[in-house]
Amino acid sequence: MTASKIASIPLSAIAQQTRSSARSLAALSTSSKNQAIEAIARSLESASADILAANAADCKAAESAGIAKPLYARLKLDETKLKGAIAGVRDVGKLPDPVGEIQTHRELDEGLILKRITCPLGVLGVIFEARPDAAIQIASLAIKSGNGVILKCGQEAVRSCEAIVKAIHQGLADTDVNPDVVQLLTTREETLALLQLDQYVDLIIPRGSNSFVRFVQENTRIPVLGHAEGICHVYVDEEADIQKAVAIAIDAKTQYPAACNAIETLLVHRAIATSFLPIVATAMQEKNVELRGDGLTCEIVENISAATDADWATEYSDLILAIKIVDSLDEAIAHINTYGSRHTDAIITENSTTAATFMGQVDAAGVYHNCSTRFADGFRYGLGAEVGISTQKMPPRGPVGLEGLVTYKYQIVGDGHIAGTYSGADAKPFSHRDL
């Protein structure tokens, strides 16, 4: 269904259509879902020129409107990025089907059998900003997990997302999957309306700032899977390998600074600061990174700005890095747990005991030892793609792939069994035998 057609239909009716189509999708075989996913990949390839042209128009309009540099980086969809997204669709098709998995198979008594079986959530409402490739990832994950999805893109990505969803619908047209399982909303008014559709939508996934996630949580009765800011850290311990630490810090900051898993703060143990900081500062400045440091850092590294308390709590999503010298591992952990966003944090050290303490005590969805925070990604985790990175404590946490989009139901099959048999003075005991 095109955006123009959607505009003329009440959102509740669109959600009903999505829910009805999702029920049919939930009953399809793995083979049918995989065929639909491959059809989407082929359709996206055929429509690549149209999608890239639409994205170029979005980028031009966004530049004229003065879009922030990090948002522009996320918005821009070149041929390489699009090919990668399509490859991700095919990777999702190769993954095991998360639906219909028997998690528990237990005899309660002779002829009375309990099963716990995974099943789709139903309908997802996913609200995201300038990330048109997210529409591709989310649609493929939704179909593989048997869910319908209502996508709400940011204003800056409307043309791109309309072209993408059009291609997805064309791909699904000749498959067993009804194209109505994927819908696209494009206006701000529809965001608020979507949040009120608790009768039809089972999970809201907002991808944006902490304030935006809080706004969504405060304005809906639908469960929310929060993907908030990425204030990520690298801590360079006193027993770090300096060459290793420099390479990891450079990658974590500059490989794709607009990503939510790029670091915003570098913590350095005082014992290694004078030997490490001049080297890493030079390497960062060669990559055009603006450095901001605490008082001690500014004494060691010349001609950098002084950091303020606000810097420790800021997601720059740009070539800006805050640096702080700490006296101990405990101080580094305390800083991260105070200012971090529970996304991804890393320690660089050759001491495995120190690393284990860091990884055990840092409160984040991802805790790494001697590697870049940029590995926090569904594709890199082998999930095929992701609907987002959850920074909440309750599962799913971290990159959310297929396993985060299913729930389960209990099924019991008996033969005239009644509960009264198992209660009272002559109660029959349960066998509770796992099968």
Image: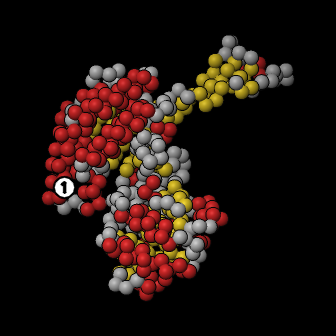
Measured as percent of width and height from the top left, residue 30 is found at 45, 24
Q: Position of residue 172 (x, y in %)?
A: 30, 26
Which residue is label 1 attached to? 62
Of the pair 9 and 318, the residue shown nearer to us: 318
The residue at the far bottom in this view is 299
- Which residue is at 53% across, 70% downward? 241
Q: Say if 435 sits above or below 271 in the image.
A: above
* Residue depicted at x 39% and y 57%: 260
In this rendering, would 44 be left or right of 366? left
Q: Quadrant of residue 35?
A: top left
Horizontal arrangement in the rendering, residue 319 relative to residue 324 (left or right): left
For the point 37% across and 77% down, which residue is it? Answer: 282
Graded by Cα atoms within 10 Å as few (under 14), some (14 to 19) or many (20 or more), the crowding at tag 1 reads some
Q: Quadrant of the N terminus?
A: top left
Which of the pair 206/255 is nearer the observer?
255
Query: Which image quarter: residue 192?
Result: top left
In the rendered structure, which amino acid carries the disc numbered 1? Ala
Q: Secondary structure at mark 1?
A: helix
Q: Position of residue 51 (x, y in %)?
A: 21, 41
Q: Nearer the viewer, residue 344 or 9?
A: 344
Quarter of the C terminus within the rendering:
top right
Q: Residue at x 40, y 66 (%)?
A: 250
Residue 383 in sight from this viewpoint: yes
- Looking at this view, name the residue that lies furthest to the right: 425
Q: How is the image coloured?
A: secondary structure
Residue 124 lies left or right of residue 14; in this view the side is right
